[in-house]
Amino acid sequence: MIDLTNAFTKVYSDERTQDAIVPAVFRRIGMHEFSANSDLMSNSKVASVSMRMPGVPGLELKTIETSATILQYIRGMARDKSSRGLKEFTLEDGKAIARRIVPSIASAESCVSCHNKLLDGDVYALGDVMGAFVVETDLTRPIRLNALFAVGAFFSVLFASLLVIKRENLRMQNVVNALTGRVKAESYANFLASHDSLTDLPNRKLFLERLDLDFAKFREKTCKNVIVAIVDVDDFKLVNDTMGHDVGDALLKEIGAKMSGLLTRYGGFTARLGGDEFAGVVTVCDGGLWPEDLGSDLLDVLCVLYECNGVSVYPKVSIGVSGLNDLDERGPTQLLKAADVALYASKRKGKFCASIFDDDLRNEFGRQTYLTSVLPRAINSGEIKAILQPQVDAKTHELVGFEALARWTHNGQSISPAEFIPLAEDTGLIGYLDVAVLKHAIALLRQLVTRSERGFRLSFNVSTKDLQTDDIVKNIRDVLCSSGFDPQLLTLEITESVFLEDWSSARRRLDQLKNLGLKIALDDFGTGYSALSYLTQFSFDVIKIDRSFLQQLDEDETRSILLSHVIKLATNLGKTVVAEGVERSDQAVMVAELGAHVLQGAHFGLNIDTAPELLLRSSVTHRMSA
């Protein structure tokens, strides 16, 4: 059996190709190799063994069986799925033949789908007989040899023959078991290589292959359109964090199953791209499906109440949909990129919606492509600069520090940070951008210090993406060393979104930054999911109240009470409270009365260059400079 397995493995590996399906592999490797090397299959060197695997006549790809009797028996096994095969000992052409026929059954979905794909139709289903293993042994010579030694002992010869038959049957059964096990193992390995282990959906590799095939149909004009939809589960990390990963996994399975069910009705294909992101592709032949319809149907099907491991979950999804007919440059890569652009448009709209790649997004996509191409040069050339927004003492309105904000003017046009910072994050340039803006901000601050002969604090926003790499610690350390700037005067601002990413790694890097002497501020406080609980997860030095708290502060008593308690809580925890978004003098007075320490906003100038009078006011000792 060891020799048999080695021989089989060698032939199989020599002849197998990447695209081969398992039964076709058996035919190609040629089981006559075992017949030609029968001494590898048995310790007996007198018995000639042959093996083959014919398919169901008329259904399989090809058949190599020449015996009409065996072909007829295989047809019978295909009709009667309960047949377990045939064991027989017969005389044929003057030879004593021991034969074992075992049905080859479609036991894996991947095997069925691969055969049906090549046969271009729904030929097979799970449980169908696709062919048979035929293992034969020519016992003529062993029987003759045994007969020569037992002439005159008829019963002894008969008994010996029966033993030989039994032994050969057992050996053939072992061969069949070994080959069948290897077939199943190879089939499962192929399935895992092309499918997601959690949802059993095709993975990204198989999705891209299907997308190429569908595009070929479009190019050959056998279909009218190809539509791609990308689905992202909104705030999925929150599900994992609050309900457990078992619930999160169960939710992904449910969403994948429902999406696959919908797209299957359209003749489409569904895959899990990774994490909480799914993708589907549909070929449109009759013009009856539009991208808008697919996006709407997906929202209706996916955003329903699920029962996952005994927990009720109502997920929301963001969807991006694009069709080849809506693209200027048509290709699989462009189609997938367009759907991705539409997905991010849904995210910007506030999530829980479906966006279609249309003229507006096409223009936006073109603009993003252009800005992405010129962004590296803008960073290196200093085209992206820092401005310093004043921060003043809440009681005296005296200048205590600045927040450095990135600004980009390109060809005379001002480009919003909300536009170019996400581009820098997506292209991996955010670290270089942060370093460039911080260096320029420190240079500007030195000029102000020289003019006023006073020291000021500097606050600087750090991207969540930047905190996901260890480069941030090295980069800021290098900037401080090269500039000589006092690290105790630098505050790094982070947003609550860092808690929804890899918080453990981010916290380690924030600890390293604090060890350099920096202070850490929690920005946009109060806009997330459970901001109060974040105060216990890290020792923040500064809390920045989001500008939304100041809106209609004088008209909404509830808002005023809430803000008062938030400020009191932060103050009692020893945090410096900064209120941003102060646009009017009455807001400044009210926030100061509620206990805020530092104010920032348009009322005091969006840039120190527009409010130079602040530099003339006398110095003040403030906890922000401590």
Image: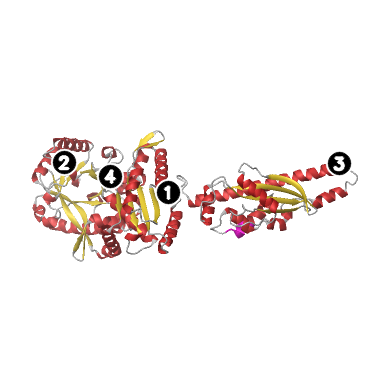
Q: Which quarter of the picture shows residue 35? A: bottom right
Mark earlier in primary sequence (1, 4): 1
Query: Magenta includes 433?
Result: no
Mostly what secondary structure, the magenta segment? helix
Query: Magenta includes 12?
Result: yes
Work out which quarter of the rendered image holds the C terminus and state it. Answer: top left
Mark earlier in primary sequence (4, 3): 3
Q: Residue 246: x percent and y percent? A: 42, 38
Res. 596 mark: 2
Q: Left or right: 279 with respect to 390?
A: right
The reply to whether the C-beta atoms of the residues labelled 1 and 3 are less than 8 Å apart is no
Res. 264 mark: 1
Which residues fall within the magenta stretch? 11-16
- Distance from Cα at disc 3 to Cα at disc 2: 109 Å
Amino acid of disc 1? Thr
Q: Dot 4 corresponds to which residue?
A: 496
Q: Left or right: 108 with respect to 87?
A: left
Q: Residue 98: x percent and y percent? A: 75, 48
Res. 155 mark: 3
Residues packed near mark 4 inside 10 Å, few (<14), some (14 to 19) or many (20 plus): some
- Distance from Cα at disc 1 to Cα at disc 4: 39 Å
* Secondary structure found at label 4: helix
User: Which is in the foreground here, disc 1 or disc 4?
Assistant: 1
